[in-house]
């Protein structure tokens, strides 16, 4: 039922398109790190929170605390 709407839907994709985009990103030989990509595989800027050092420190601290509770 949704297939006829696919060309008109901004975020619609298929496995082949997704695979090509992921492969292109993963095989990129540049030394760029921390890049986010939009639904078309174009580089984009992350959210304001991503660039906030205080927020980043909190995420790291909370992640470490959570991992410290895991039974290995």
Image (tube, grey):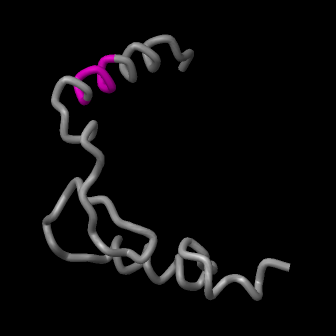
Q: Residue at x 79, y 78 (%)?
A: 2
Q: Position of residue 26 (x, y in %)?
A: 35, 71
Q: Which residues are magenta?
A: 56-61
| Left or right position of 23 against 59 | right
* Membership of 60 in magenta stretch: yes
Figure check: 40 above or below 57: below
Q: Main secondary structure of the magenta part?
A: helix
Q: Quadrant of residue 59?
A: top left
* Membership of 7 in magenta stretch: no
| Left or right position of 27 against 33 | right
Figure check: 55 above or below 26: above
Q: Residue at x 53, y 17 (%)?
A: 70
Q: Quadrant of residue 60?
A: top left
Q: Quadrant of residue 28?
A: bottom left
Q: Residue at x 24, y 57 (%)?
A: 45
Instruction: Report the front residue among 24 and 5.
Output: 5
Instruction: Report the front residue among 23 and 56.
Output: 56
């Amino acid at each position: 039922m949704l297939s006829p709407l696919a060309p008109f839907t901004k975020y619609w994709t298929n496995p082949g398109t997704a695979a090509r985009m992921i492969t292109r990103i993963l095989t990129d030989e540049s030394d760029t790190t921390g890049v986010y990509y939009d639904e078309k595989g174009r580089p984009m800027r992350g959210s304001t929170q991503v660039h906030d050092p205080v927020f980043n420190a909190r995420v790291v601290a909370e992640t470490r605390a959570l991992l410290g509770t895991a039974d290995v």
